[in-house]
Image: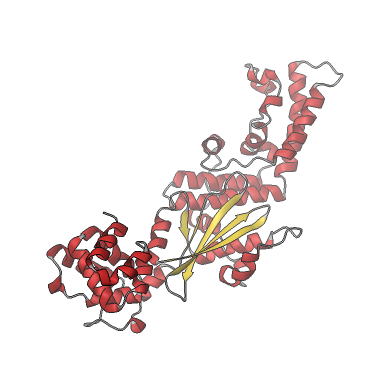
Amino acid sequence: MSLASALEGAADSFPDLADVIRPANGDPMRLLESLERSSSVMLLGWLLNKNLVAGEELVEAWLEEADGLAAILELNPADLNKTARKVIRRAKHFLRSRGIDLPKTAPEAKVVTLPALEESFNTAAVTPIDPSGTRLLFIVEENPAGGLRLFEVTVSEDRGILGVRVYSAGRSKVRNFLKELKAGAVAEVDLVKALVARAVAGHPTDRPMPASLSEWRGHLVDAESLTASTPGDAAFEALGDSEDLDADFVIELAKKGEVGPWPPETKALEVVAQKIQDRLDGPLVLNEKQKMDQVNEIIDESLEKFFGETRGIKISERYKESAYIHWKQGSLETAKACLAAARAFLDQPPTRNAVARYFVETPLSSFLPKAKEENVDQEDSLIVAP
């Protein structure tokens, strides 16, 4: 039975509290805020005895709040059955393991502090970078009104800050959210603030910042953020980049959508496609090798344009940041491959970078000479080995 269903049963058993229990709609924090201390203790004890699963869920949620902790500590073990007493013992052990000294008697809510739990939520998280260069950044901080604030910042490499959303929730909900962020990874707050600061610095001058950023900017960036290390920097420091680029492996990651792909913008590729089409439809009669040579020249020019200098640095940063996520998820091979790719986009000429070539040639494949699909000798192939 869910907590909401169990609380409905409690409302039937305690008619005097029904008008307080039902409006909470199964939300432990709303329930805690609405109940008097004595009622909280009575309701919690009843749930633990009648519906252990629901009672344990309520204990877990209330542990995160001063009023809830006070109610838990005020429970009389003599009023609880054996399994309910075990739940309370586990809860107290949980608190002691985090260095919290439990008082002999239930304290007033205003003097109950949870330093270890608060410290554990000085955290942040990042999601992978999608093919457009967009990702979500999460920063968690204490909410003066109780519980936590969860900031969700949408950032884009080319478009800067796309939006800022702020959620208020109890610690248990935020903890569960971070646990379920399977595609992303938890990171230190300073590392993620550095990513926010870089997105702010790179925000286009002709596009206004979201109003929500102005409201919460002081919570998301500070003076040190712009020069601080990012999660990708942390991955580089921990793993280095001694691995040689395994282009086939990195390209396979892109094909699967695990890392990238990050091709140039569609409009830019359309220009290249038109150049290829014009060249092949020109007045000159060309054999297949000549066609490929002509197209290869256009491809090489586009590689220099798309991945030389600034653009190459941006793709390098994407791979470095991706390395952090896979490192934290335990995929060490993928993390090291990402760091090797990051180095390749910095150090290698784009025309010698097989991953960069894949990003351009794949969306243009329908415009390439048919001879490429036939088993032409390698020396005549459009694909230039790195």
Percent coordinates x, y for residue 287 in the rendering: 77, 15
**Residue at screen point 34% across, 76% down:** 66
Q: 141 left or right of 212? A: left
In this rendered view, identify the residue nearer to me: 232 or 115.
Answer: 115
For the question of whether residue 29 can be seen, the reply is yes
In this rendered view, identify the residue nearer to me: 266 or 360.
Answer: 266
**Residue at screen point 29% across, 65% down:** 58
Please tell me in which quadrant of the rendered image residue 115 appears.
bottom left
Q: 261 left or right of 31? A: right
**Residue at screen point 70% across, 37% down:** 351
In the depicted structure, whether residue 248 falls above or below residue 307: above
- Tally of numbered tags: 0
Please tell me in which quadrant of the rendered image residue 281 appears.
top right
In this rendered view, identify the residue nearer to me: 54 or 176.
Answer: 54
For the question of whether residue 101 can be seen, the reply is no
Percent coordinates x, y for residue 323 in the rendering: 51, 50
Question: The N terminus lies in which quarter of the figure?
Answer: bottom left
Identity of the residue furthest to the right in this view: 283
In the depicted structure, whether residue 180 falls above or below residue 276: below
Please tell me in which quadrant of the rendered image residue 260 appears.
top right
Q: 314 left or right of 117? A: right
**Residue at screen point 56% across, 65% down:** 193
Percent coordinates x, y for residue 350 in the rendering: 69, 40
Question: The C terminus lies in which quarter of the figure?
Answer: top right
Percent coordinates x, y for residue 137 in the rendering: 54, 58
In this rendered view, identify the residue nearer to me: 244 or 30.
Answer: 30
